[in-house]
Amino acid sequence: MSIKKDRVMQELQRFGGAMYTPVILFAFFGLTVAISIVCKNTMLLGSIADKGTVWYDFWFVVEQGAWTVFAQMPILFAIAVPIGFAKKEPARCAMETFVIYMCFNYFISGFLTLHGSFFGVDYSQAAGAGTGLAMIANIKTLDMGMLGAIFIACCSAWIHNHFYDTEIPDWLGIFKGPAFVVAVGFAVMIPMALIFCFVWPAVQHAIEQFQFFLKTSGIIGVWCYTFSERILLPAGLHHFIYLPFIFGPAVCDGGIQAYWLQHLDDFATSAHSLKEMFPEGGFALHGMSKVFGLPGAALAMYFCAKPEKRKKVATLLIPATITAVLCGITEPIEFTFLFVAPLLYAVHAVLAATLSATLYFFGLSGNFGGGLIDCFVQNWIPLFKYHASTYIMQIIVGLCFTAIYFFVFRYLILKNDYKTPGRTDDDEEDKLFSKAEYKAKKEMEKKGLANNPEALKAQVFLDNLG
């Protein structure tokens, strides 16, 4: 039973990792969109940003290109997700999935063209937000966003893994490999498209109800979202939480990231409360613990270190903390205290959720899922003129939580004598820990070898090299 459970967990982690493949592109493109919008803002730059100037034209073109991944998100997920699932020939699997996904959408288009009213869909209307329809590669189809693309991509990857090496007669050799996979996928997508025509309109209605619940649950919803996103990170399952919110339709069409950037000019020229204008942005405050919380945790680990080791500990913690604060990449520092004291990580998840909920209570909203760079480019710079008081309040509350993190972590480290960096025995190495080492430690605990550093190192080598 335990083996089966471990296998399921490994598959879920693999799925989460596969979904993360396209997400790594969003940071660059999101920042580029935000910078382009800022550079076209006449209130910030004056007449140089007027429409028709060379400056405006340049940034207009840049912005159009920067929307690429957001405008084509379903296709991006359909191509990228199979790379993480294919057991062999991942590049061919990505190509096969693209073709199969296109077939799927063409089949849906065909069914709805003939019998849209039978499925409860008004296919005659133009695709757009609120219609239940979307344009995918110039195909008018059901608006399934990245969720539908991920599902079809998983199906395609399964077909690839099971049929890629299928032996067929020599005289049909041209249909071997990718051609055979696509042929099987073609046949499978016909009934699959029919099923989605029946089922997806009801799913869309359920998503609308879920959106309404979250929008009306206010602070409690923001707290639960942030806590879930943080507490599931060690298992690699946090992707299931934030992807539908930030890049999917969980609370707004197209996801928080795209919606916020699309309406940035509107938010930047209105004095209405951010929370009133965009309540959905409360679900993108989980990055505040990266900017304000983890520096407090790092300070606590520094001051809890032995005096003679503090200089060395600082050289470890400072780069990891700067990475978390600026870029929102938190694993180097989070896995360090998760590795030696899981209770500290649980406390971190609670404090992170409380920070997000507190900021939301005071009226903060926006796109704060990343680090300080996101704060400046996508929020503070373009919106500071009309929302200065909100952002000043954000910084004050954030710094208060920096202090809370410091005192709570310091108390728990000293009380429980956790071996955070700088508190180990003199003959033990002080270091930050990686996710691979954390997973290896859990594996060693099952084998009764958790305190054997050589066995732990061997397990890391086996996990990474095979």
Image: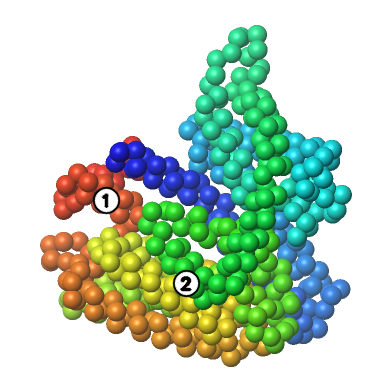
Q: Residue furthest bottom?
A: 389
| Circle 1: residue type | Lys
* Residue nearest the observer in this picture, 98 or 353: 353
Looking at the image, residue 130 sits to the left or right of residue 166; the answer is right
Q: Residues within 10 Å of mark 2 (few under 14, many from 20)?
A: many
* Residue nearest the observer in this picture, 314 or 142: 142
What residue is drawn where x is 68% and y is 32%?
191
Q: Mark 2 highlights which residue?
A: 223
Q: Is residue 217 visible from the viewing direction of this image? A: yes
Q: Secondary structure at mark 2?
A: helix
* Residue nearest the observer in this picture, 305 or 23: 23
What residue is drawn where x is 19% and y is 44%?
447
Which corner quadrant holds the C terminus? top left
What residue is drawn where x is 63% and y is 61%?
209
**Residue 140 location (% of width, % of height):** 79, 46
Picture colour scheme: rainbow
* Residue nearest the observer in this picture, 382 or 310: 382
| Circle 2: residue type | Trp
Q: Which mark is residue 93?
A: none
Distance between the Cα atoms at labels 1 and 2?
28 Å
Looking at the image, residue 236 sits to the left or right of residue 154; the answer is left
Q: Which mark is residue 442?
A: 1
